[in-house]
Amino acid sequence: MAEQPMPLWEVFIRSRNGLAHQHCGSVHAADAEMALHAARDVYTRRGEGLSIWVVPSAAIIASDPADKEVLFEPTASKIYRHPTFYTVPEEVGHM
Amino acid sequence: MTIAPTFDYCLRLADDALVLGHRLSEWCGHAPTLEEDIALANLALDYVGQARALYAYATEVENDGRTEDDLAYLREEREYRNLLLCELPKGDFATTIVRQFLFAAFMLPFWEKLTRSKDATLAAIAAKAEKEVAYHLRHAAEWLVRLGDGTEESRARAQDALDELWPYTGEMFEMDEAERALVDAGIAADRRSVRPVWGATLDAVLAEATLARPRDGWMQTGGRRGVHSEHLGHVLAELQYLQRAYPNATW
């Protein structure tokens, strides 16, 4: 019997309350439930997680690496977008 | 007065966990997928952790200077008290999954009952193990449904494994006089009272997996008395080699 390749899933883990889920890798699994298990087994072995999302990799729409210059280069000359031109009063503390 | 029975009780539970953990560890580097390789190694480590906690408590109860390593590495085959189910070879993936399922479906309600033990240490070990085994059961049940209700081959292998392992399930419910006395004293969990929960879990999952529950018949026995299959000696040969060849070696 020919083996079917198992679908790929992207894994997102939220490590602490208040933080966003972050992409941490991918797993192969036959379906959504098994993907959650695999994500738990592979990516939360050291107490990293409070919550897991898995998303079919096929559902991710990615930008084309060839568009890199068109998409990202124009921002290089606009350094004023970085909020480094403001002096923050000391009393504000850590922002 | 209850020192010897409690010691022996800890050994039974610890030996189950250590031997099954060792069998699971044999998958490391050999599982069908990388994800499952890590999943099975995780399970193995859970079992080894449970074994350690129980051996440590056993030595505390015994109080004659033996350590948890002495119990794991320096006892002979006939001194091991584990269930025969736990020592059988890992077999194919279906065999491993079916064994995990049969064992976890028993251990989850068992640990749950033991959390109410009058022995505070056993109750604490049970509370930790219960959470681990709840995941083990979910993992094995999900796989079993997919194997049973999967391809013709996966279904045949799952049913074969179930039929093969079935005669080893009776031993989980065995209780000798010493263990019954511990139950009466409120220290041990009553294995017989676990049977209805175990049966209900099996029926629900096997139905979803479209697998047939084998008929109860003659059951294997002997592990609790140290009468093992030919397989345990090979497990111990590998498990104990280092401490036997290089006594007291540390690293």
Image (cartoon, rainbow, N blue to C red):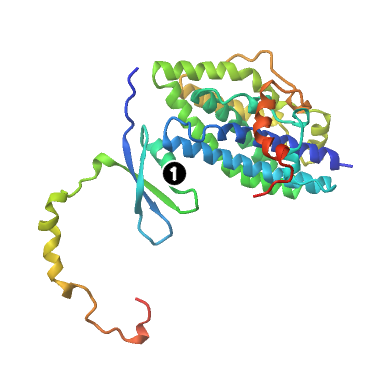
In-image side of B7 versus B102 (left or right): right
- Front-most of residues B141 and B196: B141
- Front-most of residues B2 and A44: A44
| Residue B117 spot, x, y in % from top left | 73, 44
Quadrant in the rendering for residue B105: top right
Label 1 neighbour load within 10 Å: few <14, some 14-19, many 20+: many
Tell me the quarter of the image containing the N terminus of chain B.
Answer: top right
Q: Amino acid at mark 1?
A: Val
The chain under label 1 reads A
Quadrant in the rendering for residue B130: top right
In-image side of A71 versus A87 (left or right): left
| Residue B83 spot, x, y in % from top left | 69, 28
Taking the spot 46% from the left edge, 49% from the top edge, the residue there is A44
| Residue A85 spot, x, y in % from top left | 21, 81
Residue located beneath label 1 in the image: A42
Taking the spot 85% from the left edge, 47% from the top edge, the residue there is B64
Whether residue B212 is visible to the viewer of this picture, yes or no, is no
Taking the spot 39% from the left edge, 52% from the top edge, the residue there is A13
Whether residue A28 is visible to the viewer of this picture, yes or no, is yes
Taking the spot 51% from the left edge, 17% from the top edge, the residue there is B159
In-image side of A66 versus B6 (left or right): left
In the rendered image, the residue lying farthest to the front is B246
- Front-most of residues B140 and B186: B140
Q: In the structure shown, which secondary structural element does the residue marked by tag 1 occupy?
A: helix
Count of marks, rendered view: 1
| Residue B96 spot, x, y in % from top left | 54, 27
